[in-house]
């Protein structure tokens, strides 16, 4: 059974090439505004994980429930 933090971080991540600047872009549709970039696919995926954690932590610290999060209630 996965721990709660792992479940929260499980999000769909859409990655695509940045045709203007090079590198890659990642967006997390379930977290509006959660967009990042990286030079390689590995970089952008690592940055996406960090962006997801930052978005969820920021929502919690603001007293909000992260979008797409089911707390079982």
Image (tube, rainbow, N blue to C red):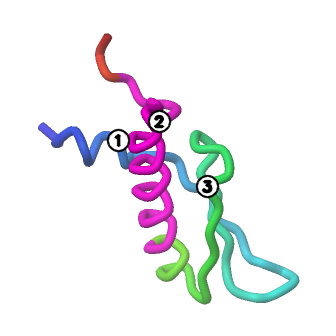
Residue carrying label 1: 8
Neighbour class for label 2 at 10 Å: few (<14), some, many (≥20)? some
Q: CA distance from mark 3 to mark 2?
A: 12 Å
Q: For this view, does 59 lie left or right of residue 8? A: right
Q: Kindly check if marks 2 and 1 are in contact, taking CB atoms under 8 A apart as contact.
A: yes
Give the camera-side residue of 36 and 43. 36
Residue furthest to the front: 62
- Of badges 2 and 1, the one in the foreground is 2
Image: magenta residue range: 46-70
Q: Is residue 26 above or below residue 34?
A: below
Question: Is the residue marked by circle 1 packed among few (<14), some (14-19), or many (20+) residues within 10 Å?
Answer: some
Q: CA distance from mark 1 to mark 3?
A: 14 Å
**Quarter where residue 46 is shown:** bottom left
Q: Report the residue marked by disc 2.
A: 66
- The spot of residue 57 in percent (x, y) is 39, 50
User: Mark 3 — residue?
Assistant: 34
At a point 76% along the width and 88% down the height, the residue shown is 22
- Residue 63 belongs to magenta span: yes
Compute the Cα span from label 2 to label 1: 9 Å
């Amino acid at each position: 059974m996965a721990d709660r933090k792992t479940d929260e971080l499980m999000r769909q991540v859409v990655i695509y090439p940045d045709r203007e600047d090079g590198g890659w872009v990642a967006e997390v549709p379930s977290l509006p505004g959660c967009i990042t970039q990286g030079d390689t696919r590995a970089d952008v995926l690592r940055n996406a994980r960090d962006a997801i954690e930052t978005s969820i932590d920021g929502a919690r610290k603001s007293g909000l429930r992260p979008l797409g999060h089911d707390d079982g209630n």
